[in-house]
Image (cartoon, helix red, strand yellow):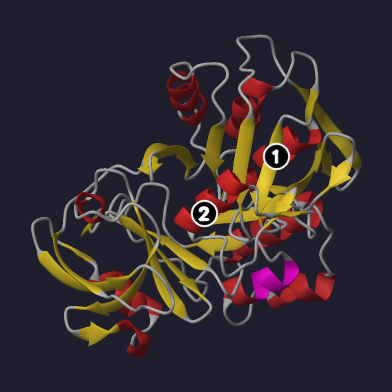
């Protein structure tokens, strides 16, 4: 996990607690070690595998596979979903940021884009840890939370809000209008949802319309949904991706038959764009179907799998590298934009839209 960007989903999913210190059965530990030994993309060191039985399991596990995680939550255990302000919470460069969900409490209060969170219920968030902030902006349905927010780091004009907490379903695709410009915000790739929703929305747009897809905060989701969604713009039979396991080529995926869109595309990406999000962007860039604007993506061009262990706990680990058309490897290096924007400005949407309109972005 990127130490500069820890993301928590609020208002629509339960706050799940993942711990590596809970007791594990000997059988489950053996099963975990065997899975990593035989199926992990990079064969782990045997000494590291044996260390998994000592200390904090997740900390040691991530030394073997930085994207891996283990959860003690059983297959049949469910956690209550708290109500929230209708936003995702980010920590980045020492600041807390909120990205509102369309039609959630924060959005209905007039916030449509990223804002900096300064104060919750009279308490300065700079003095709080991440867990405390999450708890402060979520709770029971109908509770009231007082926020002080600002549109940027300089924060010349902070704004106070009173929000009523409510439960929401997180959409994978949203339509946002900023300064009369429509953006399709892809928040994550959800199986059997994202492609259909985006296809329905784009079908309403005239063919000559320049579509603006915002993936700056898309940190992944279902890989196959991302490929299916990219295939909406890629001719039948063309390469989408290839996957490689530790033994070599595993699968070659091609664009299936079906309706295709020819709209010109601009994709917004950032260092927060990861996994399925950056692979979607990379597929379209590789085929010359979209220009990418922003900063380089995360570089998590891998696929993970989940395995339920004997004691009901869940192991998630990396098992495949995903390679873009033209055998472009983006794991570690990320997808690079065609039009480069500074890291300080990539999330300043209004400024970014103005520069795109005026052509004042640097050609990469």
Q: Which mark is residue 232?
A: none
| Residue at 52 percent of width and 26 percent of height | 195
Coordinates of residue 285 in the picture (x, y in percent): 75, 37
Where on the picture, by quarter, is residue 231?
top right
The boundaries of the magenta stretch are 60-64
Q: Secondary structure at mark 2?
A: loop
The magenta stretch spans residue 244: no
Q: Secondary structure at mark 1?
A: strand
Question: Dot 2, crowdedness within 10 Å: few (<14), some or many (≥20)?
Answer: many
- Quote the CA–CA distance across marks 1 and 2: 17 Å
Task: Name the residue tied to disc 2.
Answer: 217
| Residue at 17 percent of width and 84 percent of height | 122
| Residue 313 in sight here | no
Task: Name the residue tied to disc 1.
Answer: 291
Query: In this rendering, is residue 276 above or below 259?
Result: below
The magenta stretch spans residue 61: yes
Q: Residue furthest top?
A: 258
């Amino acid at each position: 996990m990127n130490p500069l960007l820890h993301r928590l989903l609020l208002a629509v999913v339960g706050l799940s607690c993942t711990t590596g210190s809970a007791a594990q059965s000997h059988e489950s530990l053996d099963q975990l070690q065997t899975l990593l030994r035989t199926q992990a993309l990079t064969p782990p060191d045997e000494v590291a595998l044996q260390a998994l039985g000592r200390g904090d399991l997740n900390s040691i596990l991530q030394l073997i596979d930085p994207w891996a995680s283990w959860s003690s939550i059983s297959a049949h255990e469910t956690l209550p979903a708290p109500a929230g302000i209708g936003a995702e919470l980010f920590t980045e460069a020492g600041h807390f940021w909120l990205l509102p969900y369309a039609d959630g409490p924060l959005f209905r209060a007039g916030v449509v884009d990223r804002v900096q969170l300064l104060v919750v219920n009279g308490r300065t968030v700079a003095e709080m840890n991440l867990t405390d902030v999450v708890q402060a902006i979520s709770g029971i349905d109908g509770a009231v939370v007082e926020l002080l927010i600002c549109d940027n780091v300089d924060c010349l004009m902070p704004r106070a809000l009173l929000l009523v907490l409510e439960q929401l379903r997180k959409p994978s695709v949203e339509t946002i209008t900023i300064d009369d410009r429509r953006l399709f915000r892809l928040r994550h790739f959800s199986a059997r949802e994202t492609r259909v929703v985006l296809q329905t929305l784009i079908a309403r747009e005239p063919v000559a319309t320049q579509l603006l897809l915002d993936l700056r905060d898309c940190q992944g989701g279902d890989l196959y949904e991302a490929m299916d969604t990219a295939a909406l713009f890629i001719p039948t039979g063309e390469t989408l991706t290839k996957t490689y396991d530790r033994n070599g080529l595993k699968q070659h995926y091609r664009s299936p038959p079906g309706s295709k869109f020819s709209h010109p595309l601009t994709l917004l990406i950032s260092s927060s764009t990861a996994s399925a999000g950056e692979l979607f962007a990379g597929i379209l860039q590789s085929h010359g179907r979209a220009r990418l604007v922003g900063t380089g993506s995360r570089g998590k061009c891998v696929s993970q799998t989940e395995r339920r262990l004997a004691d009901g706990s869940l192991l998630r680990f990396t098992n495949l590298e995903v390679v873009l058309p033209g055998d472009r490897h983006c794991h570690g290096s990320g997808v690079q934009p065609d039009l480069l924007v500074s890291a300080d400005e990539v999330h300043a949407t209004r400024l970014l839209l103005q520069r795109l309109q005026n052509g004042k972005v640097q050609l990469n």
